[in-house]
Image (cartoon, helix red, strand yellow):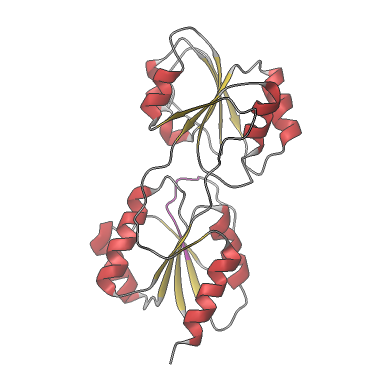
Amino acid sequence: MRILILGGTTEASALARLLSGRSEFSPLLSMAGRTSDPRPLPIPTRIGGFGGVEGLIRFLAQERIEAVIDATHPFAAMMSRSAAEACASACVPLLALRRPPWAPQEGDRWIEVGSTGEAVRALGDEPRRVFLTVGRLELPPFAAAPQHTYLVRTIGPIGDALPVPNVIAIQDRAPFNEAAERALMERERVEIVVTKNSGGAATYPKIAAARALGVPVIVVARPEKPRGIEEVASADAALEWLERRHGRTP
């Protein structure tokens, strides 16, 4: 069974490992290429886009894809829309592998906003020490608030994505742990955290650390993803879905 996994998440990587060595499956992992040094995985991997919906439709036909798993990042709304349109047009079964979003708990000081631009405005006019964990591509809007000191953590270098006077750049990759996150925030005297509601356990420790320290967190809500698509929350559940579909293959 030929499978296309649209990846970029820990769930996609976990599914790739589950499928590795399974002779009844022939998986291909597709990565957008936004991470400069992706971790190698034990299945064939392609890097780059498809050329829109029409390009993806052609790819599905050329590769004889029999099922697609949309395990893209919760904020990769455009890719999810393209996958839904292409699979519907090509009559290829589509499953969404989507991790649940985080929810505020007692003691959290969340400021929920609908976009990165709203997050910039929510920081206010007074200079603050900001722990910014929104990814390199979301940094430019914060240049509109140069009065703040930004502690920016990304997987790759930020380059000139945030041209403000006071930037401390950290390159690191999840998973993180709460003790280290708390120590980092205390050492850098973080006054507020800005993050996207990506969900999952790998980056949640910053939320727990902020709660323990009484630090407010600006949380950017997820964009809308296509509806009406079967959805699971774990790689194990995605594998079960594939096994059921394979069992129906003539």
Furthest residue in direction bottom, as rendered: 250
| Residue that appears at 52% across and 45% down | 101
Q: Is residue 223 magenta?
A: no
Q: Nearer the viewer, residue 207 or 8?
A: 207
Where does the image place residue 53, in percent across and percent down from the top left?
Answer: 26, 60
Coordinates of residue 121 in the picture (x, y in percent): 39, 18
* Quadrant in which residue 18 is drawn: bottom right
Vertical relation: 125 (above or below) 91: above
Camera sees residue 41: no
In the rendered image, is residue 87 in sight? yes
Residue plotted at (30% across, 64% down) = 56
Quadrant in which the C terminus appears: bottom left
Q: Residue furthest front?
A: 106
Residue 210 image offset from top left, x and y in percent: 64, 27
* Number of numbered markers: 0
Place residue 152 in its image quadrant: top right
Q: Residue at x 52, y 68 (%)?
A: 44
Start and end of the magenta stretch? 29-35
Residue located farthest toward the top when viewing the structure as drawn? 126
Q: Picture coordinates of residue 14 (x, y %)?
A: 60, 61
Report the side of 45 relative to 90 (left or right). Answer: right
Q: Is residue 92 above or below residue 169?
A: below
Tell me, yes or no, whether the highlighted magenta stretch contains residue 34.
yes
